Image (tube, rainbow, N blue to C red):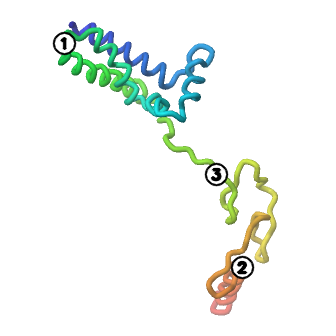
Amino acid sequence: MSWGSLVVVGLAVWRLTRLLHAEAGPGDVLGTFRRRIAPTALGGVVGCFFCLSLWTSAPGAALIATGWRDGLLLWLALSAIAIGFETLISAGRPSTPVYEERLTGGDDGVLRGRDAKPDARAHDAAGFARPENHRTHRAADGHDGVHRRQVAERRWTSHG
């Protein structure tokens, strides 16, 4: 086996891995495939470039290996070539978010979903805007936040 064949097969493994992992393909065939298998264990493999490169490098290693020891080493080497090339070409791109959180409205009015109207607010006694579905949280002494703020303002003005 020559260095040239190792590089060519390594690039072929990278191309196949990239195609299955991140590209839509003609007519969004591969995108549809990824969406359908997403909830399965196979979806987890296709969703991870590193994991998928191990699977796509196995046939390439079997094609160019002369024995099982060479095959085992080539399997890992081809996966490493694919990972290295992907890392090299994606160095300038922003990373894909790993975690996405969908925000929904809550009792505290801080987080609002997409359906919430930002201008649909009521105002409390101090003139602060609050959502219409806001429930006033009471402190241990039974007073709400507005009462505590008014008491604090009175103390500040009486000492000043």
Question: Could you say whether the residue bearing mark 1 is in a helix, strand or loop?
Answer: loop
Image: 106 above or below 61: below
Q: Give amino acid for label 1.
A: Gly
Sequence order check, earlier mark of 2 and 1: 1
**Which label number is shown at residue 79?**
none
Q: Secondary structure at mark 2?
A: helix
- Does dot 3 land on a helix, a strand or a loop? loop
Q: Nearer the viewer, mark 3 or mark 1?
A: 1
Q: Position of residue 89 (x, y in %)?
A: 41, 24
Check if mark 2's residue and mark 3's residue have beta carbons within 8 Å.
no
Q: Is residue 80 above or below residue 144?
A: above
> Which residue is tagged 3?
103
Distance in Å between CA atoms under marks 2 and 3:
27 Å
Left or right of residue 69, residue 64 in this image? right
Foreground: disc 2 or disc 1: 1
Residue type at numbered disc 2? Val
Image point (60%, 23%), residue name:
32
Per the rendering, the mark at residue 67 is 1
Residue nearest the observer in this picture, 152 or 130? 130
Q: Residue at x 30, y 19 (%)?
A: 78
CA–CA distance between discs 2 and 1? Answer: 78 Å
- The residue at the point 48 percent across, 25 percent down is 21
Q: Nearer the viewer, mark 2 or mark 3?
A: 3
User: Mark 3 and mark 1: span between their CA atoms?
Assistant: 54 Å
The local crowd at label 3, few if under 14, some if 14 to 19, many if 20 or more residues have their Cα within 10 Å, is few
Whether pointer 2 and pointer 1 mark residues with C-beta atoms closer than 8 Å, the reply is no
- Which comes sooner in the sequence, label 2 or label 3? 3
Name the residue tied to disc 2. Answer: 146
Rendered location of residue 60, percent (x, y): 32, 13
